[in-house]
Image (cartoon, rainbow, N blue to C red):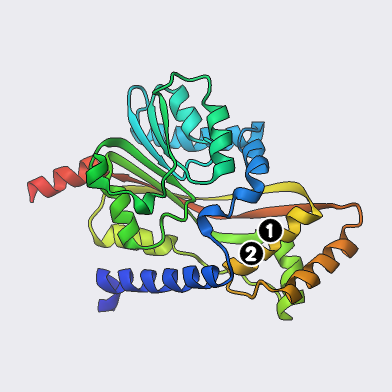
Amino acid sequence: MNDFFNAANWEKAWKDESDLKINRMKKNGIDPTRSFDQKAKTFNEQSFSEEGRKRTKRIVNWLEGLGVRFENASVLDIGAASGVFSVPFAERGARVTAVETSPPLIELLEENISNFAEDQVKIVPIPFEDIDVEAKGWNQAYDLVFVSMSPVIHNWESVEKVLQCARKFCYISMPIIPAEHSLVNEIWPLITGQPYHTKLTEMGYLLHLLYLKGYAYESLITREAKTTEVSREAALQEALTWLGHHRMPVDEQNRNIIADYLEQAYPSGKVVIHEGGRFGKVLIQLQDQNIYNREI
């Protein structure tokens, strides 16, 4: 029971699990920071569709309901992608620093912010992991630090670096069960001989460590789903990426198994994919944390 309240043990467990996952992905030739390159255009279209905008608005409304104000605020959007949140933040009057390294996503981000004043949304094409927060002048420089579904968050050390940039609020979202994916359910038995079973992810580490370390925060868990239609080639690439994420060999044999299946199952060349899962969101209130520390 004592281990349950031992933050150092939780930090080590999260780091060990994350290191194992990252090393397996690298071994399979997958760079998590570039995993969206192949579907940047599709992701952008979905993000700025009517349904995508509704989802974004729900999250922004949740933040505003908890006291976040965007008018004249400074926001650091880490893993900004094509601007799915940077754009609505700027529309509400915020000055946004958007960290993004994927070339196709940066190109789409530049298009999406072209109507704003030149200095309202600044793109930083450098991996956040490589940024020296002190040297950059980012220490407690932002009213809100926003990190949505980004591989930047992979252990407690990465969380501390993100928190270092925040003056008032820090938002982090992560998948809890991200694996409700129809294509994975179809191809997994072909590769492993076993049905696919979902696994809980690192959100539990984040919430428990915030609790143990005395942070003030609000959390929300939602269930979301979407349906997309992609080409067989895009489906093949997505399936191979999933194998890499789940520590399976991304080799010629598995590629051929998946390609043959897709050709037989989807003769039209279009693959309909149903995705869903539970996702966690947490808003950390640094103002309360600073007041608490001063009182102590």
| Secondary structure category for the residue under label 2 | helix
Check the image and report above or below for 1 versus 245.
below
Q: Which residue is mark 1?
A: 238
For the residue carrying disc 2, how many other residues have a C-alpha within 10 Å: few (<14), some (14-19), or many (20+)? many
The residue wearing badge 2 is 242
Q: Residue at x 39, y 31 (%)?
A: 96
Which residue shows up at 33% across the image and 30% down it? 74
Residue 43, located in which quarter of the rendered image?
Answer: top right
Secondary structure, mark 1, is: helix
For the residue pair 254 and 175, the one nearer the viewer reads as: 254
Q: Is residue 242 toward the left or the right of residue 65 in the image?
A: right
Where does residue 33 sit, x and y in percent of width and height? 51, 54
Horizontal side of residue 65 vs 273, given as left or right: left
Could you say which is closer to the camera, residue 25 or residue 293?
25
Coordinates of residue 292 in the picture (x, y in percent):
15, 47
Q: Residues within 10 Å of mark 1 (few under 14, many from 20)?
A: some
